[in-house]
Amino acid sequence: MRLISGIKPSGSLTLGNYLGAIKNFVKLQDELKDTDILIFIADLHAITIPQDKVNLRKNIKDIAALYIACGLDPNRTHIFIQSEVPAHNQLGWIMECNSYIGELERMTQFKDKKAKQVQGVSAGLLTYPPLMAADILLYDANLVPVGIDQKQHLEMARNLAERFNHIYGDTFVVPEPYIPKTGEKIKSLSDPSKKMSKSDDDEKGCICLLDDLNIIKKKIKSAVTDSDTKIKYDLTNKPGISNLLTIYSCITGMAIKDIEAKYIDSNYAQFKADLAELVANEIKGIQDKYNDLIKSKELDAILDAGKDYANYLANRKITKIYNKVGLGRKR
Ligand code: AMP
Ligand code: TRP
């Protein structure tokens, strides 16, 4: 069994990334003892929208350090940077050539991003899902933990695996998504109809793992909530408080109904104050480890080892794929 996932270094990591993705990477790492685990930093995906080169490099290192600070164990999980494994691009191109423009144009994330960015929509924004499929299929991964926003891309990876297997014979494992039951989509604190996102213009809506702890508490205390005062989970009528309950549940592991019971006689202010402390406490632990790691030489050694292992697996696979497709000369 093999598990793979990645995160784009297109900004500072958010509480959404942590609760929707990284916390699950760690949980699965600890539960699935016999599974080979690869977690990478998807820098090739980040440049589908323009990036400042200094920021990009900083974000890559930050994510690597945060992965470990959040609980990924480099002795157990191979951590690497996508662009340091050229086979991702090699297979990405083959996947692009097996994708149809129509299906790529129908991807929700492409449509959303295109709508937001009227000018200069890069071809990479359109061909991002075949590259993501390559990231996964290259390693014959069975399991891919992601937030719900990536479900459609994962479906595409499954389709591409089946399509390729049908044309060229059995080559790829068809991967399964792993989407958490709670926390699959953490919402913006200022507009709970939107996903919490690192590219959000409204800073109040998004908590970054490297934010100052007092600012984090302030953002939670001033999160948009609904007009009545009951602490009750109701996504349709009370999206604000429901989002905060979800965050509470992810951090503490408590079931939502138990949290509701605990706060039955409380008001929003008390609940938010408690949640602010909980979140700040959890993030403090992460920041302390991050601060130690980011200065150390250890991080580069971990990324070098991850790169070597990923290249070893990926190069073996890409040779087989080239032979199946008939590229170059037989190797
Ligand atoms: P990205 O930041 O778009 O590269 O996303 C990296 C991972 O974090 C993916 O698995 C996403 O589904 C997950 N993710 C990003 N934002 C959120 C959010 N607000 N809630 C839950 N999961 C998220
Ligand atoms: N597309 C993912 C995101 O934006 C990041 C990603 C790239 C990924 N390649 C992947 C996630 C492969 C899982 C597996 O969130």
Image (tube, rainbow, N blue to C red):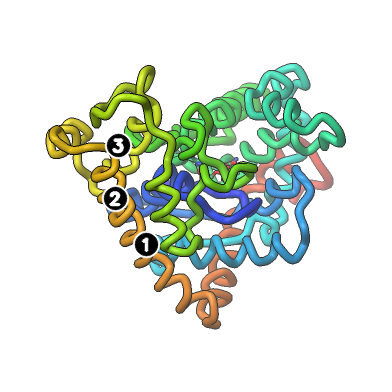
Kindly report which numbered mark, 2 or 1, lies closer to the viewer in this rendering. 2
Residue hosting label 2: 273
Is the N terminus in the top left, top right, bottom left or bottom right quadrant? top left
Mark 2–mark 1 distance (CA, rounded to whole Å): 26 Å
Vertical placement of 290 versus 153: above or below? below
Element marked by disc 3? helix
For label 1, count other residues whose C-alpha is less than 10 Å away and answer few (under 14), some (14-19) or many (20+): some
Residue 19 bears which disc, if any?
none
* 275 sits to left or right of 168: left
Mark 3–mark 1 distance (CA, rounded to whole Å): 23 Å
Residue hosting label 3: 245
Q: Residue at x 82, y 47 (%)?
A: 329
How far across and how far down the image is residue 125, in percent? 75, 35
Which of the 4 quarters of the picture holds residue 297?
Answer: bottom right
The numbered mark, 2 or 3, whose residue comes first in the sequence reads 3
* 14 sits to left or right of 53: left
